[in-house]
Amino acid sequence: MARTSRWLVGAVAAWALGLAGCPSDPRPREVAAGSMDAGARDVVAHATLGDSDGAEQQPPTTGRAAMRAWLAAGSWRRWRCELAAHPGGGLSPHTLNRICNNDVLAGASEGAPWPVGAASVKELHLLGESDPVVGYAVYLKVREGVDGSNWFWFEYVRPGVTLDPPVPSEADGTVAEGFGDHGAARAICVGCHQRSGANDSGVTGHGDFVFTRVPAP
C-alpha cells in the first residue's frame, strides 16, 4: 500500500507539472464537449482509429459522453475477460479489478508492439466482482508506434466513490480522457503503463503499455 501511495503522489505531481509546462503540440486539435482539457480529441487522418465513434470491438475516442454510453451498452463484456475481479498488482492503483481484452489484443501474437485496434476495458470494484462496478479504465491503440500518444486513454470513477488509494477526478467522475501525450492521460495512465515490460516493482507486463493480456482460447 505504501508503494502504491508513493506512486499515486508522484503521478499527481507529474500531472500538475505537465499541465503547467507541457510543450506546444503543432497538430491540429478540436475540443470535445465536456473534455477534460483542450487535447481530449485529436483531428487525425481517417486511416487511423483516432476519431472513432465506437463499435463492438472498438471504444469511442470522441469524448466522455460517447465513452460512457459505449460502456453502458456493454458489448465489451463479450470480449475475452478474466473470470473474476482480483487485487491490483505491483504498481497498480486500481484496487480490485477485472480486465477484458478485445479480439485484436486477445488474438495478437505475444509481445510488443501491439497492433492498431488493440483495446482493453478494466472494471473497477471496491470489494469484488459480485459488488457493483464503481468505475472503468479503458485504452485503445490508435496508431502504429511504441509511444503513449499512440493510445487513447479513459478512466472514470462513479462520483461519491473513493478508491483506496484515492485518485483525482472531475465532478462527473472523469479521471483521465484523451491521447497519451498530454494532461492526466499522460501523467496518470501513461505514467503507470509505460512500466509494462520493465520487470521492476514485481510487475513485468507484456510491453507497449499492456500489463494484462487475456489470451483467446
Image: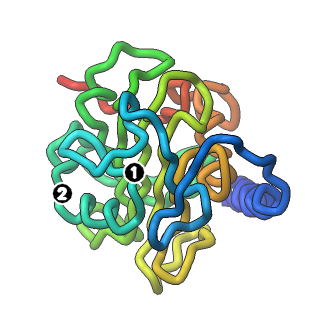
50 and 212: which is toward the camera: 50
Residue 118: image location, x then y, percent: 36, 31
Closer to viewer: mark 1 or mark 2: 1
Please, is residue 194 above or below residue 145 in the view?
Answer: below
**In this rendering, would 1 be left or right of 154?**
right
**What quarter of the picture does the C terminus occupy?**
top left
Please, is residue 70 above or below residue 162 in the view?
Answer: above
Q: Quick one: label 1 or label 2, which is nearer the N terminus?
A: 1
Q: Residue at x 22, y 65 (%)?
A: 72
Residue type, mark 1 in image: Thr
Q: Secondary structure at mark 2?
A: loop
Q: Is residue 7 at all visible to an observer of this figure?
A: yes
Q: Residue at x 52, y 78 (%)?
A: 162
Quarter assignment of residue 198: top right
Q: Residue furthest bottom?
A: 160
- Which residue, given by chain and number where applicable, does mark 1 sit on? 61
Residue 184: image location, x then y, percent: 63, 58
72 and 167: which is toward the camera: 72
How far apart, in angstroms, are the residues tagged by discs 1 and 2? 16 Å
Residue 56: image location, x then y, percent: 18, 44
Numbered circles on residues, count: 2
Residue type, mark 2 in image: Gly
Quarter assignment of residue 105: top left
Q: Residue at x 61, y 64 (%)?
A: 37
Could you classify mark 2 by the number of other residues whose Cα lies within 10 Å: few (under 14), some (14-19), or many (20 or more)? few
- Which residue, given by chain and number where applicable, does mark 2 sit on? 74
Please, is residue 114 above or below residue 48 in the view?
Answer: above
Residue 163: image location, x then y, percent: 52, 72
**In this rendering, would 174 be left or right of 125?**
right
**What quarter of the picture does the N terminus occupy?**
bottom right
Q: Residue at x 49, y 35 (%)?
A: 211
